[in-house]
Image: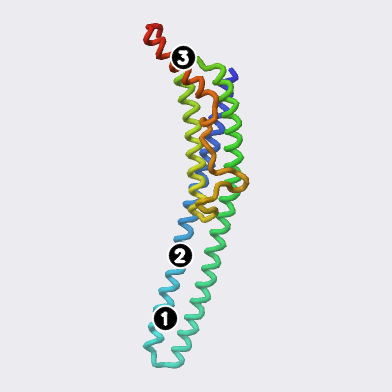
Amino acid sequence: MKKEALQKKVNKGLSEVLNRADALEQLAEDIKVMTVEGQEKITELDVQITEVQEIISKTMSLQEAKELQAKISDLQQEKELQSGVNLAKVNSKKSEVVLLFEDFSKSYLNLKALYRELDQVITLEMNIKTVDEDSKLMGKISENAYDAIYHVKEVLISLDIIGVEVRSFGGFHLGQARMATYAHYSTVVKQLKSLKIHFKRAGVL
């Protein structure tokens, strides 16, 4: 009963980790879209400034030239303000990324603790009948959790929140090994699979 109950907890913990990793990727995508939209507004203003400058170069009226120059000043000021707004929006979203990453790291560490607990139970209870299923279960959880960390780190790098060489962020180690790497069940799996082969050859299975 303990094994089944633990499996449910682990599956729930894994879902939480994956959901938060997905949320971080979506947030990163939102920031990219926001950045593009902001840059498009800057580009539009640059085009307007260039157009007015071309008109100035051809005008023969001093009054018109002054008015056009004032318009350029207004456009340049608007461009400067737009740049500030763009930066503020992105920084605000990046703050959300950092907060969501904190939630992700807590979820991952909770999952890791549950995985270790499940590892102990499976290591003791695994038998020839369950070895394939148990091995597949533990391996899948480990790989999914590892992939989640990889994608989350890529998000942080893509947003320039951390550098490529950074190994930890917010007290969380980003280069963690797969959970299965140091699990005990794998030792039992090797022994049981060897016995399984032996019994099959002997006609027992």
Observer-side mark, 3 or 1, equals: 3
Left or right? Give the position of 112 relative to 144: right
Colour setting:
rainbow
Residue 165 in the image: above or below residue 132: below
Residue 48: give x, y in percent of width and height.
42, 75
The amino acid at mark 2 is: Gln
Q: Which mark is residue 129?
A: 3
Spatial CA span between label 3 and label 1: 80 Å
Spatial CA span between label 2 and label 3: 60 Å
The amino acid at mark 3 is: Lys
Check the picture and name the quadrant holding the C terminus.
top left
Q: Quadrant of residue 123?
A: top right
Between 76 and 103, which is closer to the camera in this rendering? 103
Residue 57: give x, y in percent of width and height.
39, 87
Ranked by sequence position, the earlier of labels 1 and 2 is: 2
Total residue callouts? 3
Seen at 43% across and 16% down, the residue is 194
Q: Secondary structure at mark 2?
A: helix
Q: Which mark is residue 39?
A: 2
Residue 9: give x, y in percent of width and height.
58, 28
Seen at 52% across and 17% down, the residue is 126
Observer-side mark, 2 or 3, equals: 3
Q: Which mark is residue 52?
A: 1
Seen at 48% across and 58% down, the residue is 34
Q: Secondary structure at mark 3?
A: loop
Seen at 58% across and 57% down, the residue is 92
